[in-house]
Image: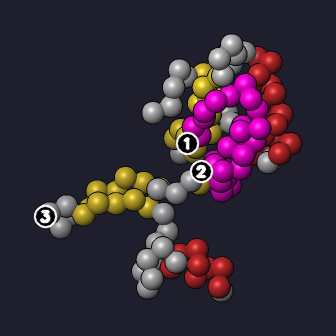
Amino acid sequence: ASRYRSAYFETFPGVWAHGDFIEFTEHGGAVIYGRSDATLNPGGVRIGTAEIYRQVETLPEITDSLVVGRPIDGDVEIVLLLVPAAGHSLDDNLKNTLKTRIREGASPRHVPKHLIEVPDIP
């Protein structure tokens, strides 16, 4: 019970907070933007992005990364955007190293569907 209370009532005492980000308009309506927590839900399994970041950050070949969920056919695919360190590129060898590191350090369900090299993370 205490875990339940801390998960949902600790952010705003006495107010249920479950991770959805919404904005109320001046006319009394609401705009729902979606989840604001760092949890993805591919195949109905909750995946914390911190678990993926923890593995990526062990590799000096990567200087920055961003994990996002891509909605597809009623599900979510995990996409990992990566900024390689100077002198490195996201070749097949580095992709395989990343996938292995994530699989062994987190779980097979944490392995992203897509790994994409980007020049920078805003």
Residue 69's disc is 1
* Contact, mark 3 vs mark 1 (Cβ under 8 Å): no
68 left or right of 13 in image: right
Which quadrant of the figure has residue 23?
A: bottom left
The residue at which mark 2 appears reads as 40
Element type at mark 3 = loop
Mark 2: amino acid: Leu
Q: Which residue is outermost to the left?
A: 27
CA gap between label 1 and label 2 equals 6 Å
- Check disc 3 and report the residue beneath it: 27
Circle 3 Cα neighbour tier, 10 Å, few/some/many (<14 / 14–19 / ≥20): few
Residues tagged 2 and 3 counted as in contact (Cβ below 8 A): no
Q: Residue at x 13, y 64 (%)?
A: 27
Q: How far apart are marks 2 and 3 (CA)?
A: 32 Å
Residue under the image location 18 percent in, 67 percent down: 28
Q: Earlier in the sequence, mark 1 or mark 2?
A: 2
Q: Quadrant of the C terminus?
A: top left
Label whose residue precedes the other's in the sequence (3 or 1): 3
Query: Is residue 102 toward the left or the right of residue 40 in the image?
Result: right
Instruction: In the rendered view, tell whether residue 15 sits above or below residue 45.
Output: below
Pinpoint residue 44: horizontal percent, then vertical percent: 65, 55
Task: Please name whichever residue, 59 or 66, is drawn nearer the observer in this view of the structure.
Answer: 59
Pinpoint residue 63: horizontal percent, then vertical percent. Answer: 64, 30
The segment highlighted magenta reads: 41-67
Classify residue 12 as left or right of residue 60: left
Q: Residue 85, position in %: x, y?
A: 66, 22
Q: What residue type is labelled 1?
A: Gly
Q: Residues within 10 Å of mark 2 (few under 14, many from 20)?
A: many
Does residue 34 show up magenta in the picture?
A: no
- Residue at 52%, 41% in the rendered image: 71
Of callouts 2 and 3, the N-terminal one: 3
